[in-house]
Image: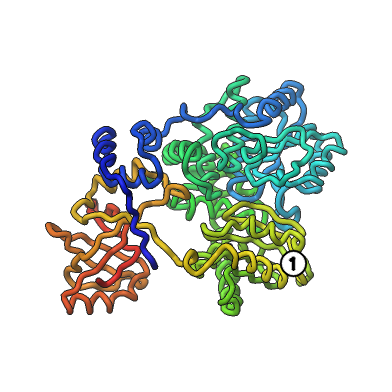
Amino acid sequence: MKWERIQLDDVNWQDIVSDEIKITPMLAKILANMRITKPEDVRRFLYPELKDMHSPFLMKGMEKVINRIIHAVDNKQKIMVYGDYDVDGITATALLVRVLRSMEADVLFYLPNRFVDGYGLSTQGIDYAVSNAVSLIITVDCGISAHDIVDYSNQLGIDTIITDHHEPKEELPLAYAIVNPKQEGCSYPDKDLSGVGVALKVIHALMQTTDVPISFSSLLPLAAIGTVADIVPIVGENRIIVKHGLKLLSSTREPGLTALLEVSGIRGKMIDTADVGFKLGPRLNASGRIEDAVLSLELLLSDAHHEAIRLAKILDEANTLRQQIQKEVLDEARQFVGHQDNKKVIVVAKDNWHQGVLGIVASKLVDEYGKPAIVIAYENGNGNGKGSGRSIPQFHLLDGLTRCDELLEAYGGHKHAAGISIKRERVDDFRRIINEYADKVLNDENMDRKMDVFDINLEEVNPKLVWEMENLLSPFGIGNPRPVFSSFLVEVAGVPRIVGNNHLKIKINSGTRQIDAIGFGLGKMLDDISNSRNNQKKVHVAYRPQMNEWDGTSTLQLNLKDIKVA
């Protein structure tokens, strides 16, 4: 892996910002790399406050949306919140339903079934609204491309409000009103809100307009979970939502969230983005991937602890089943990849792969091969394929799909992730054309796996720096990745060894002390390092410093990401 050593031209500001804000020069350097250099901007980033959130009425269409919702509530019109089956859509639905219920609105919800409705608005969902005498549908995390379905809803006399964050096409659906920060003519400063983030802004606007007997801060834990799970940039308002939401989540007493934390094994600890991404999110996603996402929504809306625990245990079991199915599909997908070594975009397809794990398998392929990946499943042996794609930072996936528009039955998504529908007989042409586009925008150099590193003297690595990373710079994610540091020509002390499942355990001399270091999955480096010691050579290390808690003692440890023999 190539290390990109981050260089900054002017270093004088580091000491200035460090002295004024009382942070280490290294943290100032990290922020400067993110183009955050002014002391007031540094404060705003490190100490984000709810008052820094923008007025929701800066979002195009918001006033019309709020007026229609208040009219429906005041006149006892039935409202249906129409969500999506992923974590972003489920949390957005839970938030809006909870707020409308607090306003004594006549409200019900509908989550599409992945295997029956497919993604987004469906005729089945509209028919369900008709059968329940619904007057107003409010979508969350979907609808921006649902032209035909919105027309169908209009014909049946139901108003549709679309709240979404996905990339809109040139022509928008003929909905009653639309709020989406990405739509043309919208001046809202934060364009990268998640679906639950947009729903939260609708609630924000409601709270500024009418009496809503629920606190804004109480909604932030759910909003944080959906925001992190949807892998949007954790900057701007997303950072405010996640920073405050995760802190409140750690001490929540909401029955559904408490039960979810309990079955995930993290109740009582400070929750971070990794906990959401690897523990909470997968369990909430599991029901929609395996059967029906309504189970997860019922958990988040539950008021009874015993019922919440029952639902959370079912989700935990569903997640275990999902992991088994995912492994089977991934193993088979790898076999197809071997025939596409010369392709820059991986496109694999097979009959009867489980649709609920396609996106995860695509993500795994991206991680393993460093290429965009699209995984397609043909339904029950027929010619209809459903696919899910994930990408690398250098390749805009939605742009790539746009080049294949005529081959696809339907598609949607954004730069990093997308979904498609395609006929079996068109997959080969699709693979060819998306790779022709990839050949134009990708080359061997920009596809090389790279890791940005901040050079640091090992003597500067201390508990204070770790504290700053965990308490000031976090939460981490796209736009604010957890930093990796690099130290050069350091000496390996003692005898390197393998622990656990091929993990490398070493000690490193920093001059005045020895620091423990562990490299997960780096056992393959043992011989090289052992030989370098015998030849009295030194190593370069890339790592993340952390505090290792063991038997009541906290010690500094380096989590190695890569090692190079000097």
Give the structural element (helix, strand or loop) at label 1.
helix
State whether residue 546 appears in this view: yes
Residue 29 percent across, percent down from the top left = 31, 46
Q: Is residue 518 above or below residue 153?
A: below
Quadrant housing the N terminus:
bottom left
Toward the front, the furthest residue is 9
Q: Is residue 406 left or right of residue 520?
A: right
| Amino acid type at mark 1 | Glu
Quadrant housing the C terminus:
bottom left
State whether residue 321 appears in this view: no
Q: Is residue 277 left or right of residue 360?
A: left
Residue 244 percent across, percent down from the top left = 44, 36
Q: Nearer the viewer, residue 413 or 401?
A: 401
Label 1 neighbourhood size at 10 Å, few (<14), some (14-19), many (20+)? some
Q: Nearer the viewer, residue 281 or 230?
A: 230
Toward the right, the furthest residue is 155
Q: Label 1 belongs to which residue?
A: 379
Q: Is residue 77 above or below residue 114?
A: above
Toward the left, the furthest residue is 512
Residue 187 percent across, percent down from the top left = 60, 33
Kindly identify the residue that appears in the image at 37 percent across and 37 percent down. Answer: 46
Kindly identify the residue that appears in the image at 22 percent across and 79 percent down. Answer: 531
Q: Quadrant of residue 428?
A: bottom right
